[in-house]
Amino acid sequence: PSRSCPSRRRGPPPPPPPTLSYPRGRYEGFTGFPIMFTVTAEVSDTPEALGMNVGFGASSVPVGAMLSAVKGVNPVEEEFEWMPCLDQAGRHITCFEAVGSGGNASAPECVDMIVHIDPPPLFLNASDDGVSRSVTEHVEVTLGAAKLYTLYASDANCGDEVTISVFEELPAGAVLLPQEGHASHPEAPLCATPPPSPLPPPPPPQNPCS
């Protein structure tokens, strides 16, 4: 007599791996200024993925960087915040992956961060009664005549604040008018703006680089 073979039953298909995303793969910043972005992951809306929890894994996280607790259900997000110190200027690559509760993980995605040393502000050509002159030139004044001399300064770091102050006392009768921000100047270089932050500005750190 013929022998019947037991039939094999297939189990439910494994849930799909989460999908990982982030704002963009490259960031530029400056020492002493925060770099912040949000990593997001989600699972497809399928029966296999129902009830699956998602977390994150990260590698090559810079010293001093902080990762928030995972927020949300689907999608979920994790916030990255880092204020690079002076000795951390250069290139840093941090990779993330989204991991489901079933152990399946997304392909790793890496964020390339370029940290520049915060540059000092520079004086641009001044306006001497409407005439463009170098700030190293002597300024001629006439007795009894008003003189309007306008200084311009610029910083390659858009996140920095530039303040012009008097190093020594002004001559008798001279007045320093209130400073105006974001003044236009034909010689002002384009500044590099740190990426917009999804987080509110952090409180001033206490010796973050000591």
Image (cartoon, rainbow, N blue to C red):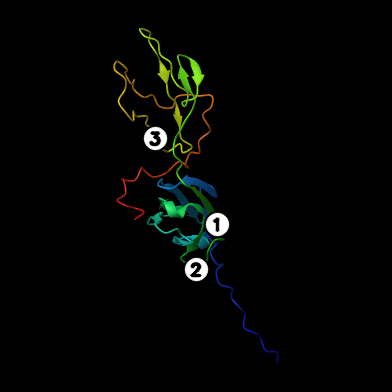
Question: Residue 26's x, y, as percent?
Answer: 54, 48
Q: Which label belongs to residue 109?
A: 1
What residue type is disc 2 on? Gly
Q: What element carries label 3?
A: loop
Quarter occupied by the C terminus: bottom left
Q: Is mark 2 on a helix, strand or loop?
A: loop
- Residue at the image point whose x is 49% and y is 68% from the top: 103
Q: Is mark 1 on a helix, strand or loop?
A: strand
Q: Is 80 situated left or right of 25 in this image?
A: left
Q: Which label belongs to residue 23?
A: none
Q: Mark 2 points at which residue?
A: 103
In this view, the residue in front, 5 or 36, is 36
Mark 3 to mark 2: distance in Å?
47 Å
Q: Which label belongs to residue 161?
A: 3
As displayed, is residue 56 above or below residue 196?
below
As displayed, is residue 206 above or below residue 170?
below
Q: Is 109 situated left or right of 31 in this image?
A: right
Say whether residue 115 is visible.
yes
What residue type is disc 1 on? Glu
Mark 3 vs mark 1: give the one in front.
3
Mark 3 and mark 2 lie on one chain; the one further toward the N terminus is: 2
| Mark 1 neighbour density, 10 Å: few (under 14) some (14–19) many (20 or more) | some
Mark 2 to mark 1: distance in Å?
17 Å
Total labels drawn: 3
Question: Residue 100's x, y, as percent?
Answer: 48, 63
As displayed, is residue 178 above or below residue 194?
above
Q: Quadrant of residue 140?
A: top left
What residue type is disc 3 on? Glu
